[in-house]
Image (cartoon, grey):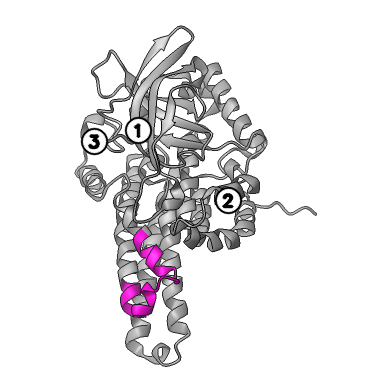
Amino acid sequence: MTIAVHPVDAALDLAASITPRLTELADPIDRGETPPQEAYDLIRESGLLAAMIPIENGGLGLDFADYTRLLAELAAANGAIALGFNMHNVAIGSLFEADVDALGSTGVAFRDWVIDQVVVGRTMFASAASEPATGARLRGISTVYRRDGDGYVLDGHKSFVSLSGVADHYVVTARPHDDDSDVEVSHFVVSAGDPGVSFSTEWAGTALRGTSTAQMFLADTRIHADRLFLGVEGMSLFKAVRDPHWMAAGYLGAYLGLSEAIVDFAAQRLGADERRRSQAADVQRLGAMTVALQATRALTTAAARGVVDRRSDQATNATVYAAKHHLGETAQSLAAQAVALVGSAAMAADQPLQRLLREVQFCSIMPAKPADCLDYVGKSTLGANMFDVSNHGW
């Protein structure tokens, strides 16, 4: 008798085959001693780039909840690489949540092209949405496109583009050059080698060097019409309002994994100290950290499962924003508590906690920011229609 393997179990097995090496690479990449390319090559070779692609199309067939669990496993080993991997899925994940029958011939052709690129070509996608003046907000972006014969020409400047120089294709947001509206936003796929595409040197942040983040410039960049995302113009903002989970919280699994790594480190250090592990105060502090981790894991899991069961539902979206806020606050709190519990040894340069402490700070910086999360949850609680674009500040 053949026993069916659940998609997430197959994906976790693939992850387990590379996480030991990802763990080894985490600190050298963070210190700038090793380029992150080796880690992303492991992701490519493992087959994990096809995590969200349906099984019938040669992928692993994960849904958003399964994906969140996979991302947590990767992040516990290497948070920066997990966050970079997430940007690949942010760029294409929504394609495989859509009803294929409703896509139309152009949309299906675009979807099939992406599947072929990932499954056969093992190419990596990335998202290029943030801009210097507007951040990750889709409203008010300055990158523009114009129609030109059988294609489009794009001009603009993107900031904080993860996987710069690593990904093969970038999903770029742009508005019509002759339209002052801030809601008509479209997505286009621009390839790394397209004319007029260039990148700055990598951003010199205090952490997450493995995300290979840089600025992206588009100068008179011409692409064919079939690189318009799903073949539809002007729907990107409305899609993000109805289904915000990728844009606002796709990386929840990554910060959950980082949080788990922090608590695991604290538990290992306390467990190895015969004297301190018998002290009630220290054991209780570890217990409080574990309770906080369990609470944020439960909320994150509920949000991810809600996306699968009740996508495009306002209550689900409110839970997504709530989970993003709670996890951001909890991750930073756990890091501070771990330092206090473990002591000065926690900040040793050859120990991972000093890196984890720096990495979790970025959860509240990434969209949606804490105030935006609370704004959404508060308005939703008061009964506002959160499918109305005007109710969103970002």
The kind of residue tagged 1 is Lys
Instruction: For residue 253, say whether it is visible.
Output: no
* SS type, badge 2: helix
The kind of residue tagged 2 is Glu
**Pointer 3 with pointer 1, Cβ within 8 A:** no
- The residue beneath circle 3 is 392
Q: Quadrant of residue 182?
A: top left
Q: Quadrant of residue 376?
A: top left
Q: Which residue is depicted at the point 46% across and 51% down?
A: 210
Q: CA distance from mark 3 to mark 1?
A: 22 Å
**Place of residue 230 in the rendered image (x, y in percent of width and height, measured from the top left):** 48, 23
Q: Which residue is depicted at the point 70% across and 51% down?
A: 4
* Residue in front for this viewpoint, 26 or 202: 202
- The residue beneath circle 2 is 38
* Residue in front for this viewpoint, 260 or 40: 40
Q: CA distance from mark 2 to mark 3?
A: 40 Å
Q: Which residue is depicted at the point 59% across and 36% down?
A: 123
Find the magenta span and give its range. 337-358
Image mark for residue 158: 1
* SS type, badge 3: loop
